[in-house]
Image (spheres, rainbow, N blue to C red):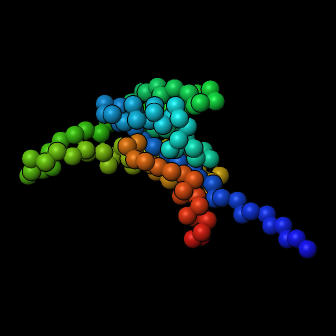
Amino acid sequence: WTSTTTPTPLPTLFCFVLVIKDTREPELMKVFLNKGIGIFACDNFTVLADEDLVLGSLPDGRPVPVEAVPGDKAWMANIPGSTQKVWHNTNIFLRAWYRIQQDGVYRHADWTVKVDPDSVFLPQRLQRLMLERY
């Protein structure tokens, strides 16, 4: 007697990233794109930016659209009362979330993941962990 089991499918991921153009983030995203890793290995993804930006195409040749989020850009400035500089980006991130909600693509995935462009993101690892825990 043999038992055959159907493997449980991994949870699907919709991933999105907000790229700040005047930083190193576009170059990092191009590296991930050329290798098809990071958010580009998710089941579906969206790339948003603070202004018009071209990244290129996936390894299979499909172009990757980048949508500029209208409104004020993020800026680097001192924290009031301090000499420490930080990114002031709350407003553009809120507009990015609103854009993701309006588009609705995330509804077709089990999970939505907001990824920082300068992070090492391993979608398959996250999917396996989520499968084990949820």
Where does the image place residue 16, in percent across and percent down from the top left?
A: 50, 45
Closer to the camera in the image, 67 or 119:
119
Q: Quadrant of residue 52?
A: top left
The residue shown at (57%, 44%) is 41
The residue shown at (40%, 35%) is 28
Task: Give the quarter of the figure containing the N terminus.
Answer: bottom right
Where does the image place residue 11, in percent across and percent down from the top left?
A: 63, 59
User: Would residue 81 be found to the left or right of residue 50 on screen?
Assistant: left
User: Would residue 17 be found to the left or right of residue 75 on screen?
Assistant: right
Where does the image place residue 71, in percent across and percent down from the top left?
A: 36, 36
Task: Give the quarter of the figure containing the C terminus.
Answer: bottom right
Where does the image place residue 69, in percent across and percent down from the top left?
A: 42, 36
Q: Is residue 21 above or below residue 5?
A: above
Most distant residue in the front direction: 1
Residue 101 visible from this viewpoint:
no
Q: Is residue 90 above or below residue 34?
A: below
Closer to the camera in the image, 119 or 71:
119
Closer to the camera in the image, 26 or 106:
26
Most distant residue in the bottom direction: 1
Q: Quadrant of residue 72?
A: top left
The residue shown at (37%, 36%) is 25
The residue shown at (21%, 46%) is 86
Residue 88 visible from this viewpoint:
yes
User: Would residue 3 be found to the left or right of residue 129 on screen?
Assistant: right
Q: Is residue 37 above or below residue 68?
A: below
The total number of labels drawn is 0
Q: Quadrant of residue 74?
A: top left
